[in-house]
Image (tube, rainbow, N blue to C red):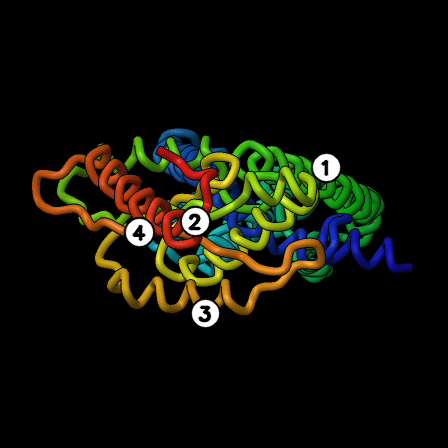
Amino acid sequence: MANIKDMVLYAGADRKSFLDIQDAMVEGNRNNLVPFSAISAIGMAVMVIASFFEPSLEKNRLAYVLTSLLMAIVLVICLYPAKKRTWMVYLAEYLFIETLLLFGIDLGTFVEPNEVTVSFDILMFAVPLLFTDAPWRMILAITASIVLYIIAALATQTPTYIVYNLSNIIPYGIISLIVSTYLMSIKVSRYLLERKNKFLSESDQLTGLLNRNSYEQHIAKIKEDKDKIISIAAFDINGLKLVNDNLGHQAGDELIKGAADCISGVFNSYGHVYRTGGDEFMVIIEGLAPTSDELWSELEKRTRCWKGSLVSGLSLCMGVVTSKPGDSIEEVISKADKLMYSYKEAYYRKNDIKERRS
């Protein structure tokens, strides 16, 4: 029962995983809606024009006009408002689906009441396959369209055609529900796999922070906007080599993870935190940052409170530099590194530790 519930609600995923990929699914649906709604709007507009020259199409003209207008509305929503509002993508998605299904219902009942319904069957089966969403919403949309078809059929068709068409539509509807749900589960699995692969390529496996690859990509983007104010914070763990030599690498890993937790706890709300080397961390803050004294005070509080199971304490050194007009990102990074290492040298001298960087 739980598996069926997860399949209907989250396409076979758990709720958290489904929500994690929701933005990607919404954007994928928006990207699909743009070309399909444009093609549908243009196609229906062509049919409107053709209906003035082909008598057999004249009876469909109103359906063509309304469908073309609604497809144009879907296109407009997707091209601008939906870029910033998730709910508008859902609105556009189901407006697109129901418009085409209602178009099929109209052709199969009011326009041609005593003919075998084909267009609605095809649209009911094919249109839901264009999108990825929570299956329960698509199930409601398809079920609602079947109910509307039955109501329209009862109002327009003879009993013979009602029985014949429903004997096709109801099985097609059930198949559509099953197939669309199954394909959505496959698409959701693909989104989850893509998200996992992206996480592995961009994240440091020990700490969960962004890795050097992500850091270099961010730096490359910053170079494209030379006027942006950037703050760079560079960090290094004091005494990691001594911990590795005396307590083992497991203790060293504990120290690295502790440093990552302390740094991200302070800086996540300001910028992006990266682990760029063994015991080296960088933070990129776009825009003005709090003063280095404020940041250091908060970081020091966290490191003083930190205690591991293998290591009794944690000490970090930090250098923060904010760009000035004309500074390149490389210059800001270099200044932050030099400042950080100057503090590190002072720390080693103060504590009379011979193992220190030059």
Sequence order check, earlier mark of 1 and 4: 1
- Residue receiving disc 4: 285
Task: Identify the disc placed on residue 209.
Answer: none
Q: Secondary structure at mark 3?
A: helix
Tally of marks: 4
- Residue receiving disc 1: 186
Kind of residue at badge 1 = Ile
Kind of residue at badge 3 = Lys
Distance Cα–Cα, label 3 vs label 1: 47 Å
Q: Secondary structure at mark 1?
A: helix
Kind of residue at badge 2 = Asp
- The residue mark sitting in front, 3 or 1, is 3
Task: Identify the disc placed on residue 352.
Answer: 2
Sequence order check, earlier mark of 3 and 1: 1
Q: Residue at x 19, y 35 (%)?
A: 331
Q: Tell me which corner region of the image, top left, top right, bottom left or bottom right, holds residue 356.
A: top left
Q: Are marks 2 and 3 in contact (CB under 8 Å)?
A: no
**Residue 192 location (% of width, % of height):** 65, 41
Distance Cα–Cα, label 1 vs label 4: 38 Å
Distance Cα–Cα, label 2 vs label 3: 23 Å
Pointer 2 local density, CA inside 10 Å: few below 14, some 14–19, many at least 20: few
Pointer 1 local density, CA inside 10 Å: few below 14, some 14–19, many at least 20: some
Q: Give the left or right position of residue 255, taking residue 33 as reference.
A: right
Pointer 4 local density, CA inside 10 Å: few below 14, some 14–19, many at least 20: many
